[in-house]
Amino acid sequence: MPEPGRSKELGVAGVICACLMVCLALVSSCEKLPVAPETVINELDTSHPGFIQPVTTIDSAPAPTIAVPTATFSWHGNSSVALFSYRIDSSAWSGWTAGTGVTITYLDDGPHAFSVRGEHRNQVTVEAQPPVRNFTVSAVAAPAVIFQPRLLSVDSGAAFSYEIRTLGVTSLFASRLIVSYDPLIAAIDSVSPGGFLAGNGGSVLPPFVKIDNVTGTVEVDLVVVGGTPKGVSGGGVIAVLWCRSLRPGVCDFSFDASSAALRDTSNAAIVIHDIVNGRLIVR
C-alpha cells in the first residue's frame, strides 16, 4: 500500500502528464490546419486588378497664341510612369526619355498640337490617351517671304523639295530672290515656279535661275503676265527648290535680305516686313 505522501506526488504527476498530452494534441492539430496563401501584388502585371495605368499630366504650355516660333512644355507622370515620349502635330514620336520638359523651335506660323505620353515601368504598357495642348504661332508680319517649313529634316542622299512662299502681298507680279546654302550639305538641281503667281489666270514667264553649287547660291527671278487682275494678292508658293542632301549635317537656307525684292503691277516695291530663313537637318 503506497504511502500517503507518495500517492499525492503520483497524482500531481498524472495531471501534468495529461496536460502535456493535450498540448501536444493541440499542436499536432494546428499543424494540419490549412494556411491561407500570402497575397502577392505584381504592379507590372497588366492583368492584376491593382494594375495602375500610366498617366501623364502637362504642367506648363504656351499661351493659346504666341508671337514667337518657339514653345516650351513641362510635364510629369504618375507612379507607374518610367519614361516619356512627345511629338508636335503629326510628326513621329520622340525617343523615350526620363526628361520632363522640352523646348521646340522653328515652328511654322499656324495652329499646332503638342502631346506627350508615358511608358509604364513594365516597359510594355504605353499611355492610351496622351494629353494634348493646342496653340497657334503668329510670328510673321506680312508682307513676308518665307521658307516653308522653317525646319526640314531628310535622310542623307535623299532628294527633297523646299518651298519659298509669300504672305500678305497685294498685286504682286514679279519677284527677285537670292538664297545661300551650304554646298557641302545640300545641292540644288533646279527651280520651278510655284502655283501662286499664276493664281490670277496669268502665265509665269520661264524663270531666270542661276544655281551655283560651288559657292552655294541660287538666284531666282519670276514674272507673271496676263490674267485678271494683273497681279496676285494674298499668299502662296512662288518657287520650289529641287534639291539633294549630300551628307549629314545642318544647312541653313538664307535669303539675301539686301537684294530680296517684290514688285506690284505698277512696278513699285512691295515692302517686305519679314524674311524667314529655312533650316535643313540631314540625318
Image (tube, grey):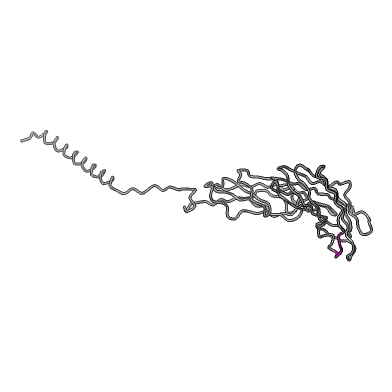
Closest to the observer, 143 or 12: 143
Image position of 190 with respect to 27: above or below: below
Query: Was residue 239 drawn as part of the magenta stretch in this picture?
Result: no
Q: Residue 37: x percent and y percent? A: 37, 48
Q: Residue 14: x percent and y percent? A: 16, 39
Dominant SS in magenta: loop
Closest to the observer, 18 or 183: 183
Figure disc tally: 0
Q: Residue 113: x percent and y percent? A: 69, 54
Q: Is residue 255 left or right of residue 89?
A: right
Image position of 275 with respect to 198: above or below: above
Q: Residue at x 74, y 50 (%)?
A: 107
Q: Residue 41: x percent and y percent? A: 45, 48
Q: Which residues are magenta?
A: 200-204
Instruction: Specify the farthest residue to the left.
Output: 1
Closest to the observer, 108 or 146: 146
Is any atom of residue 131 visible in this view?
A: yes
Is any atom of residue 139 visible in this view?
A: no
Quadrant (top left/top right/bottom left/bottom right) for the C terminus: top right
Quadrant (top left/top right/bottom left/bottom right) for the N terminus: top left
